[in-house]
Image (cartoon, grey):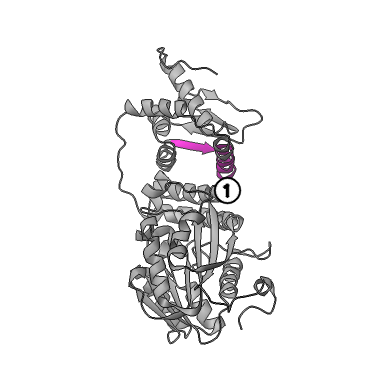
């Protein structure tokens, strides 16, 4: 289809061309576009898996100008509606976009067209939104598992429940670290403390866990006291940059995404200072297959200030301090399933969430959880676990057999 943007077009033709450009930009997924006036367009082959409805022209234009923020805010505010299963819709769009990107479709000419369109539009409004860490424990208790684990689960066996898969993740991490009773462990970014308490209770180690969230630390301290673990787990309400002391094991699960790329070398310096020569470390993080800037809508609505690293970017933690990387595992499909489970749980309590927050909040979180699942399935996002040790530490496994031995778990 050849479009001469220099010739004037009617309003209806502009709407149709806008729908065409949007669908072309994301790779012509099997998605129909329905406009506010009832007009419907479909540009792909096969049967549509869903319909994206624009409630007004501004939603269409906003998506043209900024695909990520335009779609995210449009859906959150109800100006864009998805008809059909939202996970199927998001998976279809993610897969089509990846296929088109890998084909090198996004030519300079097409990008120039988008830039020209941007220059002729109203400035986007900035809305005050609820950010990720201002929501309180009650919100997460409604849809996380009983352990309050908010990182990728490990479905060691396909029939595991979410809670069982989170415990399997704890043990998978502990086996990789070869924890031994009496060792000193430092954990950076401990969330609600589930991994720290699991390490202390089942592997007999002493844990010093850092987190700068007052609500999470208070929750973790209360749970540790109830389980009789306060003498073995110390929860420190402070930033990871204040970590001090020596340890046999350094572990961080789900914190690196929030550190910021410019701080990776500083994190490596902290680990280098704390980790004993015979020690071992593990960093578990969402990642990418290649460097890319943060998604604009996720940065605005969900994770302000975050950065999802590639493996190459992660090496700036290790290489300046000559750490030996021992093992890298990618669990992205496990995270896709984790997000599916979270979304199912979230939908079950969505009425309660709506009463406490708002319809817009519910829609934003539905999109975030569903979009994350689609991103992991399409390979847009990865989940890396990197095990490392100080240079010259030869007290390391000879093979990976220890990870999967039935006798390798803690007591």
Q: Is residue 35 visible?
A: no
Q: Quadrant of the C terminus?
A: bottom right
For the record, the magenta segment spans 80-97
Q: Main secondary structure of the magenta part?
A: helix
Image-based side of 133 in relation to 165, left or right: left
| Residue 140 x, y percent position in the rendering | 45, 62
Tell me if residue 335 can be seen.
yes
* Secondary element at tag 1: loop
Q: Which residue is mark 1?
A: 379
Question: Which quarter of the picture shows residue 232?
Answer: bottom left
Compared to residue 411, the image places residue 166 above or below, namely above
Say above or below: 22 vs 315: above
Q: Residue furthest top?
A: 7
Residue 294 pos. (x, y %):
42, 48
Name the image quarter holding the N terminus. Answer: top right
Closest to the observer, 132 or 38? 132
Q: Is residue 164 magenta?
A: no
Residue 145 in the image: x percent, y percent? 53, 66
Residue 334, by quadrant, is bottom right
């Amino acid at each position: 289809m050849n479009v001469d943007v220099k010739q004037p077009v009617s309003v209806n033709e502009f709407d149709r061309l806008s729908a065409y450009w949007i669908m072309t930009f994301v790779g012509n997924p099997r998605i129909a576009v329905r406009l506010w006036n009832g007009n419907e367009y479909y540009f792909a082959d096969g049967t549509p898996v869903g319909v994206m409805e624009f409630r007004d022209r501004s939603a269409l234009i906003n998506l043209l100008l900024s695909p990520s923020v335009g779609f995210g805010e449009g859906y959150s505010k109800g100006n864009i509606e998805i008809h059909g299963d939202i996970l199927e819709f998001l998976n279809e769009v993610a897969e089509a976009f990846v296929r088109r990107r890998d084909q090198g479709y996004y030519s300079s000419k097409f990008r120039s067209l988008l830039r020209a369109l941007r220059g002729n539009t109203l400035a986007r409004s900035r809305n005050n939104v609820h950010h990720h860490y201002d929501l309180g424990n009650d919100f997460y208790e409604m849809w996380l598992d009983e352990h309050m684990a908010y990182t990728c689960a490990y479905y060691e066996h396909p029939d595991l429940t979410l809670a069982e898969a989170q415990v399997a993740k704890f043990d998978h991490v502990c086996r990789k670290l070869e924890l031994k009773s009496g060792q000193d462990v430092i954990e950076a970014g401990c969330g609600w403390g589930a991994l720290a308490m699991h390490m202390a209770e089942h592997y007999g180690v002493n844990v010093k866990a850092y987190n700068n969230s007052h609500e999470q630390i208070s929750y973790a301290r209360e749970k540790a006291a109830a389980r009789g673990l306060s003498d073995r787990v110390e929860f420190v309400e402070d930033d990871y940059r204040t970590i001090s002391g020596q340890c046999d094991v350094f572990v961080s699960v789900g914190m690196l995404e929030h550190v910021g790329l410019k701080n990776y070398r500083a994190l490596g310096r902290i680990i280098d200072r704390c980790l004993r020569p015979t020690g071992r470390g593990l960093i578990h993080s969402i990642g990418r297959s290649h460097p890319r800037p943060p998604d604009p809508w996720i940065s605005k609505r969900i994770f302000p200030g975050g950065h999802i690293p590639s493996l190459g970017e992660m090496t700036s933690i290790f290489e300046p301090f000559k750490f030996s990387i021992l093992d890298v595992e990618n669990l992205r499909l496990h995270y896709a399933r984790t997000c599916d489970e979270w979304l199912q749980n979230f939908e079950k309590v969505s009425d309660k969430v709506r009463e406490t927050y708002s319809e817009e909040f519910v829609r934003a979180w539905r999109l975030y959880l569903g979009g994350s699942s689609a991103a992991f399935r399409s390979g847009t996002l990865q989940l890396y676990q990197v095990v490392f040790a100080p240079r010259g530490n030869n007290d390391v496994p000879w093979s990976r057999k220890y990870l999967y031995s039935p006798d390798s778990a803690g007591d």
